[in-house]
Amino acid sequence: MISEKTSKIKFVIWNPEKGSSIENIVLMTRNEVFNHYKLSSMIEVEKKYDEKLIKKINNILNNSL
């Protein structure tokens, strides 16, 4: 999950350039999902989020299975 909020969490596709799979799904709050789905490429994702957070999420997703 991107924030510490735990109410109304949803699954969301992390990298908009990839399809839905277990290696590309993260949990976000409803508001985070709304803002994240406005992003149409990984370049936009990288502009929106902190580099440290992106690296952490990508490491988790790449090692999920």
Image (cartoon, rainbow, N blue to C red):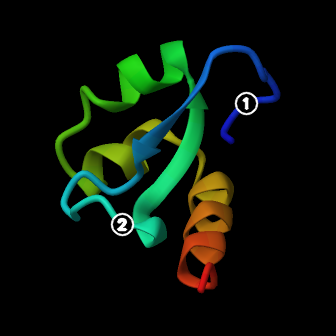
Q: Position of residue 23 (x, y in %)?
A: 46, 72
Of the two numbered discs 1 and 2 on the same chain, state the one appearing first in sequence: 1
- Residue under the point 54% across and 81% down: 62
The residue nearer to you, when weighing 30 against 56, is 30
- Residue under the point 43% across and 37% down: 48
Helix, strand or loop status at disc 1: loop
Question: 56 above or below 29?
Answer: below
- Residue under the point 42% across and 63% down: 24
Q: Position of residue 55 (x, y in %)?
A: 61, 67
Which corner quadrant of the image does residue 60 belong to? bottom right
Under mark 2, the amino acid is: Ser
The residue nearer to you, when weighing 38 against 7, is 7
Q: Position of residue 51 (x, y in %)?
A: 58, 56
Q: Which mark is residue 28?
A: none
* Residue highlighted by disc 2: 21
Q: Which mark is residue 3?
A: 1
Under mark 1, the amino acid is: Ser
Question: 43 above or below 32?
Answer: below
User: Spatial distance from mark 1 to mark 2, Cα to Cα?
Assistant: 22 Å
**Tags 1 and 2 touching, CB below 8 Å:** no
In the drawing, does residue 49 fall left or right of residue 12? right
How packed is label 2: few (under 14 Cα within 10 Å), some, or many (20 or more)? few
Count of residue discs: 2
Question: 44 above or below 38?
Answer: below
